[in-house]
Amino acid sequence: MSNFKSLPGFREFYPEAFAERRFIFQIWRQVARRFGFQEFDGPVLESLDLFKAKSGDEIESQLFCFEDKGGREVSLRPELTPTLARMVAARANALKRPIKWFSIGDNFRYERTQKGRLRCFTQLNADILGEAGPAAELELISLLIQTLQGFGLGQDDFFIRLSDRNLWMLYLAAQGYEADSPKILEIVDKWERMPEEAAREKLGGIAGERDSALWESIDAFLKVRDLAELSKAFASFAGETDASESLQARLDDWNVLLDGLEAMGLAGFVEMDLSIVRGLAYYTGFVFEAFDRAKENRALAGGGRYNDLIKKMGGPDMPAVGFGMGDVVLADILKERGIMPKFVDTVDAYLVIGGDAERAAALADANALRQSGFSVDYPFKDQGFGKQFKAASAAGARFALIYGSEELEKGVVKLRDLNDRSEEDIPRERLLLELRERLG
Ligand code: HAM
């Protein structure tokens, strides 16, 4: 074994693993194109500042950052969203809206490597910019669902937890915690993983003597599963007119989104679940995450609205919403369900060459067939027929083309169909047409 091991959290893709990767990218790309998204990419290395301010504390602590040879503080990208926001900000006036873009690329986070969590992973990102209303969320959530369906996953396999940072702000403001809401949402983000005592203690630091009341109101909010329960939760804090107008506007958005999902036949995939608040710093409104139904894996995908980020990047006021889906959790789930296809790279034809005297004719045909788009393989050295036929079947060849001295004298090659073992002499000048007909 060599001492030059790959780094923890960085994968090597041997051909079989690479074929799985190609399959994932293919479905991602296909479905995004079906929804009319355009593909783009940004640099993998950026200035450190881009992520320091924009991604939030958790990601900041995981940056792969260093000083480059020119003395610049740089970082590999931990995510694409800040780059996307900068790119759109720079051309905001020239771009036709709504902007619907997607990207497939590697991201780097210095995380503790574990199941579903690596230091280099690939994400599909899909984002819509320039649309403020919930039609954008509907488009993205339906894209997210159809993408996962494209891999053969269904309603029994995954679901989407839909939440809203705006509702949280309104709820906390109604209780007098407007200024503290970011701190409270940080606690809510860790709620599921935190013992009750620890949560109460942290809230105590904010609410003082009212800590129990705050804990209970958060606990009640986290149990809300539909709009009727939501209205009830708010009713106990009947606020001023301004607040109730904002609440009504939010409820209208929720209704549009839920009705849209219903109309698309996708309502069964989505659950209202206010425990999702998302750790990244820039989210402003609806937020959502896709999960394995068994909840055994970490999130398959996550996203939400980030209406302030384009402006922070020096652009105009432009609403935006999007999500990222990682390839690691997705591949784990496909394998657990036994629905990751087995891939075998095959060739159309394998040339079986009699000897040195026949090699020139075989090379000429190999080159012509390849130029016409057929995949063709042949042995590099003189070998016995038995070995060559073995190699043909190992290569998954559909046909063997036999270049023997007798055949070449007659101006033909013997074509053996490796499925049914039938053989036929084919004039060499007809070879291309014959393969075209047979491979249809
Ligand atoms: P995120 O929730 O940090 O969001 O990542 C999205 C998905 O990427 C996760 O659900 C997970 O599947 C995958 N992922 C994240 N970190 C890792 C890791 N260390 N190893 C393996 N997979 C990982 C974002 O990145 C946002 N920028 C998404 C977004 C786009 N929001 C708006 N537009």
Image (tube, helix red, strand yellow):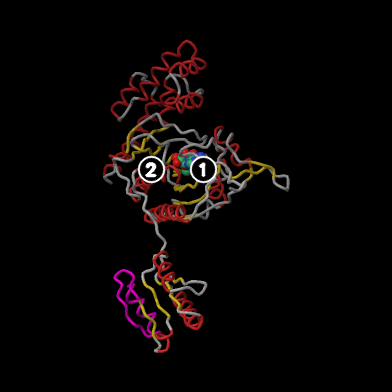
The alpha-carbon separation of the residues under discs 1 and 2 comes to 39 Å
Count of picture labels:
2
Kindly tell me whether residue 305 is visible in this rendering: no
The furthest residue to the bottom? 410
User: Magenta span covers which residues?
Assistant: 416-440
State whether residue 292 appears in this view.
yes
- The residue at the point 73 percent across, 45 percent down is 71
Q: Residue at x 72, y 48 (%)?
A: 69
Residue 157 in the figure: left or right of residue 325: left
**307 or 344, which lies in front?**
344
Residue 62 at what x, y percent from top left? 57, 36
Looking at the rendered image, the quarter that the C terminus falls into is bottom left
Q: Specify the quadrant of the image occupied by residue 166.
A: top left
> Does residue 435 sit above or below 221 in this rendering?
below
Q: Can you name the residue that lies furthest to the top here?
A: 209
418 vs 246, nearest the viewer: 418
The type of residue carrying mark 2 is Ile
x%, y% of residue 72?
70, 44
Nearest to viewer (mark 1 / mark 2): 2
Residue 39 is marked as none
Residue 255 picture quarter: top left
Image-based side of 263 in relation to 85, left or right: left
Q: Residue at x 28, y 39 (%)?
A: 268
* Label 2 residue SS: helix
Judging by the rendered image, the residue that carries numbered circle 1 is 317
Residue 405, image x and y in percent?
A: 43, 85
